[in-house]
Image: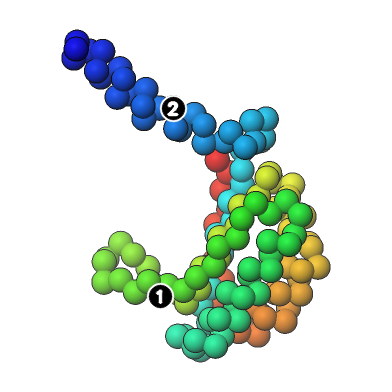
């Protein structure tokens, strides 16, 4: 087999899965991602951490939310890793409009007022679009 032909086959085998990444949304606008990093009032408090994670899972009921993930920090000694937070929440949305609708949705507002504000002392948010 020609070595050049082999390189082409290898290249295409890596390229095809990437091309099919959005096959479920062929005409979709680029997805929006929302990362929320939380520091608890009582760092390391397992009960508070669990409440934040549980209330976050309810965000999947909000229209336009594609996925929700929430979990605790993985402690790290690596200099590049900031493991000072307690909980991180990740959401993806169909588009920017759905992100803005989520922020004003009653489920989100209730979670912020009844759970996040009482338990969390600091929040940092990162939003990005593919």
The extreme right residue here reads 106
Q: Is residue 128 visible from the viewing direction of this image?
A: yes
Outermost residue, front side: 1
- The Cα atoms of the two marked residues, 1 and 2, are separated by 39 Å
Residue 28 location (% of width, % of height) = 67, 35
Element under disc 2: helix
The picture quadrant where one finds residue 114 is bottom right
Q: Earlier in the sequence, mark 1 or mark 2?
A: 2
* 52 over 45 or under it: above or below: above
**Residue in the image at 65% along x and 51% along y:** 66
Q: Which mark is residue 84?
A: 1
- Name the residue: 67% across, 81% down: 115
Q: Is 115 drawn above or below residue 1 in the view shown? A: below
**Residue 4: image location, x then y, percent:** 22, 13
Residue, disc 2: 16
Camera-near label (1 vs 2) is: 2
Q: Where is residue 25 drawn, in percent x and y? A: 64, 36
Q: Is residue 65 left or right of residue 70?
A: right
On the rendered image, what quadrant is the C terminus found in? top right
What mark, if any, has residue 58 been given in the picture?
none
Quadrant of the rendered image containing residue 78 = bottom left
């Amino acid at each position: 087999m020609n070595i050049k032909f082999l390189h082409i086959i290898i290249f295409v085998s890596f390229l095809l899965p990437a091309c099919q990444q959005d096959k479920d949304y062929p005409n979709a606008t680029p997805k929006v991602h929302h990362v929320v990093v939380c520091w608890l009032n009582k760092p390391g408090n397992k009960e508070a951490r669990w409440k934040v994670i549980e209330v976050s899972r309810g965000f999947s009921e909000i229209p336009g939310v594609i996925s929700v993930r929430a979990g605790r920090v993985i402690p790290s000694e690596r200099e590049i890793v900031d493991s000072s937070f307690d909980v991180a929440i990740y959401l993806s949305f169909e588009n920017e409009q759905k992100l803005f609708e989520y922020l004003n949705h009653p489920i989100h507002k209730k979670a912020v007022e009844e759970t996040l504000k009482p338990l969390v002392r600091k929040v940092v948010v990162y939003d990005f679009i593919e």
